[in-house]
């Protein structure tokens, strides 16, 4: 356990079939933040709307502070948690991180789910393959060092594997190697867990279950 612990669990509301929820769960694991996971039961869920009046998820509650939306929640967890930031200090590296996080959020996710577009996704994964060959800094990840961009893509890859589209990953040597490194990446906060394990399993998705993250409390 870390020495300077958070005293209470934060409450994260989301859904296992939503990649944005997975992103927040993996970020919490990376940063050593305990999470009580709460399932959002549809967009008309009264408890959800009480915290997020515009119906934007996921939602994070830290005692009396509430924040909603993927970028906001990940930013808060990155800042509130332990270990170095997952946002690069270098301006070029930071811009590349946001660029590739945007590709995952705005393009990859739009082609997932019930209307899976494997041809469109193949083009995007070809782009990731090329990016991994020329990161802005030497290293194994999208920006060289591990950043939030890797979490954005990992959450998508996780659900694509569960949906039977894992060949988008395994058929590309660079992407496949990168994904293996993400899966085994040790927590930024030096906790004894692999944060990727915080992502929903296939069983979680099929049963509509979210698992808590219990590290310190």
Image: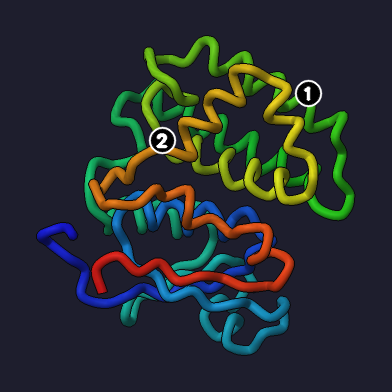
> Which label's residue is closer to the chain start, 2 or 1?
1
Name the residue rendered at 61%, 24% in the picture.
Answer: 175
> Is 79 on the left-hand or right-hand side of 182?
left
* Disc number for residue 123: 1
Picture layout, residue 126 above or below residue 5: above
Q: Residues within 10 Å of mark 2 (few under 14, many from 20)?
A: many
Locate the C terminus and report the quarter of the image it occupies: bottom left
Name the residue rendered at 33%, 81% in the picture.
Answer: 64
Alpha carbon distance from label 2 to label 1: 23 Å
Picture layout, residue 166 above or below residue 145: below
Q: Considering the numbered disc 2 on the image, is that residue within a helix, a strand or a loop?
A: loop
Q: Residues within 10 Å of mark 1 (few under 14, many from 20)?
A: few
Which residue is nearer to you in this view: 128 or 91? 128
> Is 198 on the left-hand or right-hand side of 162?
left
Looking at the rendering, which quadrant does residue 173 occupy? top right
> Is 200 on the left-hand or right-hand side of 29?
right
Q: Considering the numbered disc 1 on the image, is that residue within a helix, a strand or a loop?
A: helix
| Residue 63 in the image, given as x and y percentages of width and height | 31, 80
* Disc number for residue 201: none
Locate the N terminus and report the quarter of the image it occupies: bottom left
Name the residue rendered at 68%, 30% in the picture.
Answer: 169
Looking at the rendering, which quadrant does residue 20 occupy? bottom right
Which residue is nearer to you in this view: 108 or 92? 108
Circle 2 residue: 147
Find the residue positioned furthest to the left: 3
- Image colouring: rainbow
Name the residue rendered at 58%, 38% in the picture.
Answer: 153
Is the residue under label 1 in contact with that under label 2 (CB below 8 Å)? no
Which residue is nearer to you in this view: 56 or 199? 199
């Amino acid at each position: 356990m870390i020495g300077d612990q958070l005293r209470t669990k934060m409450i994260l509301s989301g859904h296992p079939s939503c990649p944005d929820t997975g992103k927040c769960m993996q970020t919490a694991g990376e940063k050593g933040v305990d999470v009580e996971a709460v399932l959002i039961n549809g967009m008309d869920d009264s408890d959800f709307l009480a915290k997020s009046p515009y119906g934007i998820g996921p939602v994070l509650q830290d005692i009396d502070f509430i924040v909603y939306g993927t970028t906001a929640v990940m930013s808060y967890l990155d800042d509130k948690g332990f270990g170095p930031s997952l946002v690069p200090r270098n301006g070029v590296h930071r811009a590349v991180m946001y660029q590739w996080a945007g590709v995952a959020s705005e393009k990859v996710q739009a082609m997932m789910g019930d209307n899976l577009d494997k041809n469109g996704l193949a083009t995007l994964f070809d782009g990731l393959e090329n990016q991994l060959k020329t990161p802005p800094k030497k290293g194994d990840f999208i920006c060289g060092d591990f950043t939030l961009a890797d979490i954005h893509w990992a959450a998508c890859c996780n659900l694509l594997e569960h949906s039977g589209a894992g060949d988008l990953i395994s058929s590309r040597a660079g992407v496949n190697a990168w994904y293996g490194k993400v899966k085994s990446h040790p927590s930024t906060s030096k906790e004894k867990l692999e944060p990727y394990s915080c992502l929903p399993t296939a069983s979680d998705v099929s049963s509509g279950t979210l698992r808590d993250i219990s590290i310190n409390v």
